[in-house]
Image (tube, coloured by chain):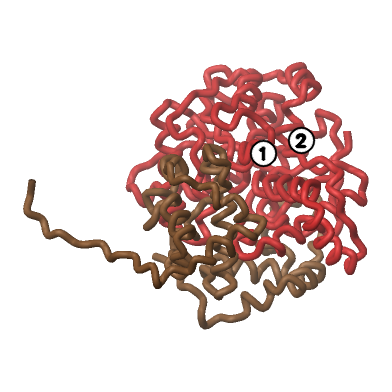
Chain colours: A red, B brown
Amino acid sequence: MKLAYFLGCTIPVRANSYDAATRQVAKILDIELVPIEGATCCPPVSIRSLDFKSWLTIAARNLALVERMGLDVVTLCNGCYGTLKDANHILRTDENLRNEVNGTLEKLGLKVTGVREVKQFTEVLCSDYAKSKLLEKMTKKLNGLKVAVHYGCHLLRPSKIVEFDNPEMPRKIDELVELTGAKSIDYQEKLKCCGAPVLAVNEKVALELTKQKLLSAKKAGAHCIVTTCPFCGIQFDLFQLKVEELIKESIELPMLFLPQLIGLSLGIEPRALGLELHRVPLDSIQELIH
Amino acid sequence: MSDREIEFKKPIRTADLDSQFKNEVAKTYEGRTILSCYQCGTCSAGCPVLNAMGLMPHQLIRMVLLGLKQEVLESSTIWLCASCYLCNERCPQGVEISNVFFALKNIAAQQHIIPKGLKQLAENLLRLGATAELTEFQEEERQDLGLPAVPKADSQAIQEILHRTGLDKLIEKRDQTQEEEK
């Protein structure tokens, strides 16, 4: 399978480990990830907050580049996914907006129709093909590891556009986690936002949300938290240190991106998965993942 | 019952209301569902940032419908929305509350009410075609991980788009920017 690979802004700047692990897993699944020349920022909801037409037109340009490649597009970031998926939906369903956007894109030598599919890498992992191939290659079972799964808002909602999983009781990532032999545990704040979207407006509020998530996962007995979004991941890893400072107690809950957890089970070295770059060390789960 | 000091809420004066405000919001793509709100409060009940908000989401919607235009546009609450879409998901009336908030923020931005952090993001986007800047450090990190170089973002295309939509002009005005809330 060949997919246009939409990397986005945040991953190369703050979450290269996610990119590294994804490419390792994709190789095992025979998925070719093709870079998108000239792609820009998706752009995020913060730009949508300032001006809808700017947000839609920039997203449409990225989609037009993908359409020109003749491929469906896959993202790693839930934010990029939310933007491209929603924009694609709007461009498919609203003729007036599509025509208006194409008026601008024409000047750039591009045209958008909304014909291509937007996927998040997790959706690719959920296919029957990927699951059976992974299961066949998973040589290391992570038995005993208790995982708190965090979906990230934009992978689930708005569900009538995203259509990934049941938005109130999702199971798809939990099932992928359990393929590795680890156990997905339930926790009170499982569906709550990580706090990242408010970070640029008010750090205090963002950290409060992050704190609630981490403490809730910890209280439920999780050994680590697993997510599929770089923003959520940064919030749980880098900003965990800030939360610890704030509440003056240690949490020490390692964060792993889903392909990293899967990679460990596939027997890939932690270093090749970028796990050494994470700020919260994996010491506390070392025995369970080796 | 204690003899606490009673504070009267200020009455809303109908003469101060802008009855067209709700239509201004409802005619936008993002705000088109607002008129269906019947004030059940389900949006507020599930909101993850409710405890930090001065006004609850359903109150803000009611204020729009009443026509308290400036109170809504100058409220810091609209910018605290995490855009998590939980309210959209649960609204029994199909009001897309997160999107209504986008519409309100868009109208506030037209009045140059823009939080500093978001202005910074928009400036980065305009300059780099990306919201964050890639440094040598990260390029080395990518090399160490065996990752290919990141394709360069076409910032010129972004500049053309933002010039046409007018967002470039909107973020130029420095003086009236709303200060970041502590």
Residue shown at the point (63%, 22%) measured from the top left = A175
Task: Kindly indicate the quadrant of the structure image that contains residue A158.
Answer: top right
State which mark lies toward you, 2 or 1: 2
Vertical relation: A39 (above or below) A144:
below
Residue shown at the point (63%, 18%) measured from the top left = A141
Vertical relation: A145 (above or below) A43:
above
Gap in angstroms between the C-alphas marked 2 and 1: 12 Å
Answer yes or no: are tags 2 and 1 on the same subunit: yes
Residue shown at the point (58%, 47%) measured from the top left = B96
Viewer can see residue A228: no
**Which quadrant of the rendered structure holds the C terminus of chain A?**
top right
Position of residue A251 in the picture relative to residue A123 (left or right): left
| SS at mark 1 in the image | loop
Residue shown at the point (70%, 34%) measured from the top left = A122
Amino acid beneath label 1:
Arg
Give the residue at mark 1.
A271
Residue nearest the observer in this picture, A87 or B38: B38
Category of crowding for the residue at label 2, using alpha-carbon neighbours closer than 10 angstroms: few (below 14), some (14–19), many (at least 20):
some
- What number is the disc on residue A24? 2
Q: Numbered disc 2: what chain?
A: A
